[in-house]
Amino acid sequence: MIGCGADFWINLCLTLLGYIPGHIHAFYVLIREREEKAIEQRTIHQGQTYGAVPPS
């Protein structure tokens, strides 16, 4: 997700309070987004078939 959402403001406040907490939160956000994309990809590929005739 891109923009100034809640994660951005939380990260900004944590970074102002301390350099390390802001970075820990940033890594958490990146890992969470990667997991969400992986789940989405698994969901897309589960219903995929490779036959010549589409399922009805």
Image (cartoon, helix red, strand yellow):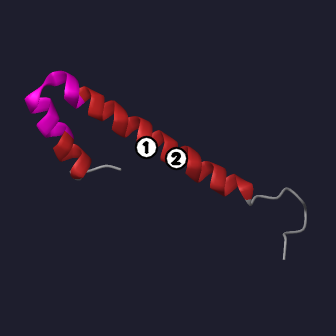
Q: Is residue 34 above or below residue 23?
A: below
Rendered location of residue 33, percent (x, y): 43, 43
Rendered location of residue 51, percent (x, y): 89, 59
Q: Is residue 15 above or below residue 46?
A: above
Q: Residue at x 16, y 23 (%)?
A: 19
Q: Which residues are magenta?
A: 11-22
Q: Front-most of 51 and 31?
A: 31
Queried whether the magenta region covers residue 17, the answer comes back as yes
Quickly name the residue at label 2. 37
The residue sitting at the bottom extreme is: 56
Q: Residue at x 19, y 43 (%)?
A: 10
| Secondary structure beneath label 2 | helix
Rendered location of residue 8, percent (x, y): 22, 44
> Quadrant location of the C terminus?
bottom right
Quickly name the residue at label 1. 33
Crowd band around label 2 with a 10 angstrom C-alpha radius: few (<14), some (14–19), many (20+):
few
Q: Residue at x 42, y 41 (%)?
A: 32
Q: Identify residue type, mark 1.
A: Glu
